[in-house]
Amino acid sequence: MMHKFVQALRIRLESVQAHFDSASPPALFAAYLFFSVVMVVATAACGLGQFPVDDRTKGYFWELNWGLNHLVLIPLGLFCCALVIQDVKRQIARISNAHMAVDGQFRELSLKQLQDDWEKVRLGPVWFAVIASISFAASWGEWWLGSAGQMLGFVPSEPREMLGWTNGAIVNPAINKAANMALSFVAFTAQGFVVTFFCYTVGVVLVFAVWIYRYSGDQQRKIVPNVISEDVRRGFEVFEPLMFRLLCMALVFTLVAFSIRMQLIYNSSYSPAGTALAFVLQDMAAGVFASIKAVFQGQSPDLFQVSLVPVFGMGISCATMAILVSLVTIFPTLILSLLARDSRESLRTCLAQADCPPCSKRSVDRADCEKRLKHMDFWPMQYPRPLELLAYVVFAAFCFIFYKFTIVLFGVIAMRMVHVVYKALARTTAP
């Protein structure tokens, strides 16, 4: 009986995981955006969309970690997550089409062999269940501690300035407590779904990075450069689409982490700003320049203020930034760079043999093959380059800690994007 239950549960988990793996990015974006609009309407109908707390305006629509995130950033983030998951599957075909995967005798591995090898190590339903369980448990725990528990009297209420729409009935008796708890439960359940999708995507990427790096030191399988590629990366340019989508996902969720942090800082501050958005514009956009001016005048400004509020949401945003900086941004690119170096050495070992299949089957002589390897670029992306990526990561982490510099980070990103677009347009319009 227990065996049948476990088997049925496994089948169900595999079905749910398959839906995550095959989710259409546009459909996922549209579905979550529709849900967010419905939440705006529902909270407004219950008086939770906007209500006063002393001299401040709170509510689903006005709180950055809910209104801005769930209407704009999270649909984009889920779109990027779905793109990354689908691109991991396509990446195996790209490697095969570039003829880069070989066995111990440097004979090319087929697409079927690569796919079978990937199936052995990819995240299974058990790991998917662990990720989903932790994500939903954390979200529902936050719902109880920050919403239902406070309204029912089981958890001490937060200070008035920290209260938001999730426990608005505490400050506004006209708001129905049952409706407040129900809507906040739906919102935190949606948060659990988002965290599950994000963490699952990170898990897929990390497993893929570890899997592909196994082809570096294994005697039975290797990754070698594509010697007939005209790109200086000699085949490793096939990883660029995946890395670009991964960086886009990292950028969007970086903004999500910043918006959570900004809302919590506003809640715990003594700023006279009436809304969180006004606080961002006054304390960050204008405040950073006022603080810099004070430095030159010999005063002691609060330019390097940290303000890490000890609440659950701050823990989530800090954990998200740590994952984005270490696991999503740095780890995969470092793995691919090391793999590229090792692949060149593997092919040079092959060239020392009487016959080197990766070269001979492509009608490339040894001298030409060695010449192509000599100036090989080990970085898988044209943009950003290693130092530029490192500078972005370090500065983003710096701005996350010293939040008043955040506006500078957004300005740098915007200027760099304009520059990249300009260069791309210049190339396409060049005679």
Image: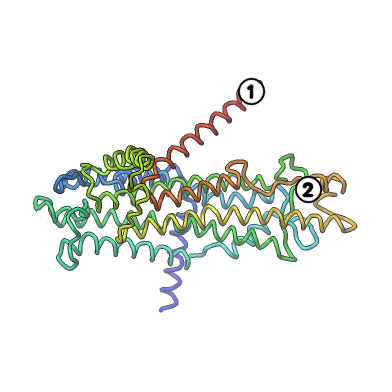
Residue 310, how many percent across, how many down?
30, 61
Amino acid under disc 2: Leu
- What residue occupies the far bottom of the structure in this picture? 1
Characterize the local packing of mark 1: few (<14), some (14-19) or many (20 or more) Cα atoms within 10 angstroms.
few
Residue at x-position 49% and y-position 54%: 325
- The residue to which callout 2 is attached is 373
Q: Nearer the viewer, residue 131 or 12?
A: 131
Q: Say if 7 sits above or below 23 in the image.
A: below
Residue 199, how many percent across, how many down?
45, 58
Q: Which mark is residue 430?
A: 1
Residue 255, how many percent across, how many down?
40, 46
Characterize the local packing of mark 2: few (<14), some (14-19) or many (20 or more) Cα atoms within 10 angstroms.
many
Marks 1/2: CA–CA distance: 30 Å
Amino acid under disc 1: Ala
Residue at x-position 24% and y-position 47%: 60
Q: Which mark is residue 332?
A: none
| Residue 352 horizontal side relative to residue 210, left or right | right
Q: Quadrant of residue 371?
A: top right
Disc on the earlier residue, 1 or 2: 2
| Helix, strand or loop at mark 2 | helix
